[in-house]
Image (spheres, rainbow, N blue to C red):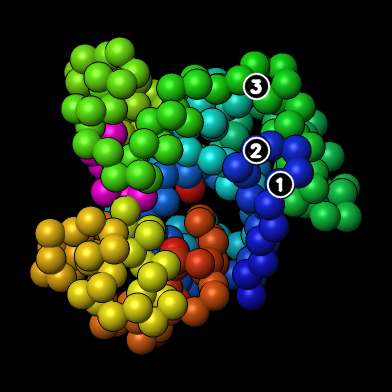
Amino acid sequence: MYEETPSRALPGAVLWRAGGGGGTVLPDGCMDLLWAGGRLLVAGPDTGPHPAGEVPGGSFAGIRLAPGTAPALLGVPAHVLRDRRVELAELWPAAEVRRLSALVAGHRDPRAALEALAARRAAETGPPDPLAAEVTARLRAGEAVARIAAAVGLGERQLHRRCLDAFGYGPRTLGRVLRLRRALALTRSGTPYAEVALLTGYADQPHLAREVRALAGTTLSTYAAGAAPSTHTAGTAPGTHTAGTAPSA
């Protein structure tokens, strides 16, 4: 079981909940604040597939934060959390996390509690780096990194450093992840593989297949066979896959 709904309090964020179980979590450029097994955790940005079971629990709730927005809220650069799932108490004072955990535990809907927590924190810390939204939009539009750097008035090395802080990896990796997400969405809709490659800017179908293998750890045919509505960090979600079938911050 997986459900999600857009956040009304944080632009670009998504509230979700999921039952436990097997599955694989695929990169999406996002970071999540999680409630699992009575604990507050953070899921960092992924560079490859992760087993959903690495976060134990019978059910999960979370808020998936838009690319580049989590570091300001959490108070740490994204690259510190790359490919990691950590207790929030590793990032914030333990007493504060205990207080927040009690609030979430006492709420009828943990997702709403996480949304309120994140919104309150965002108001206290101020807006994220505005560069992140522009870079994300340009990468989604298929712009080359050199052109993006020129457009935002930075050298490519400067842009890379800013992206490490905002996204957890450089703009080229983020671009690969975002393009893969578009490709997998088209694959789930039944679009032929060659057309998927053309529409998403891959050189050809073999190029698409190599990227699916590198970033998702599976093949296009296996993904297409098992793709179904399914979380970014626990359970299964759009773009994840369920163990025993195939393939979703």
Q: Secondary structure at mark 2?
A: loop
Instruction: Look at the image and give the residue range highlighted in magenta.
Output: 171-178
**Badge number at residue 7:** 1
Q: In the image shown, does 194 or 8 lie closer to the viewer? A: 194
* Local SS, label 3: loop
Which residue occupies 38% across, 31% down? 135
Secondary structure under the numbered disc 1 in the rendered image: loop
Considering only vertical position in the picture, is 73 above or below 11?
above
Residue 117 appears in the picture as rendered: yes
Q: Which of these two is toward me, 217 or 107?
A: 217
Can residue 55 be found in the magenta stretch? Answer: no
Query: Mark number for residue 11?
Result: 2
Mark toward the viewer: 3 or 2 = 2
Residue 195 occupies quadrant: bottom left
Report how far apart the C-alphas of labels 3 and 2 lie in the structure.
26 Å
* Image position of 30 with respect to 235: above or below: above
**In 3D space, how far apart are the residues under numbered discs 2 and 1 (Cα atoms)?**
7 Å
Q: Does the segment drawn in magenta span residue 177? A: yes
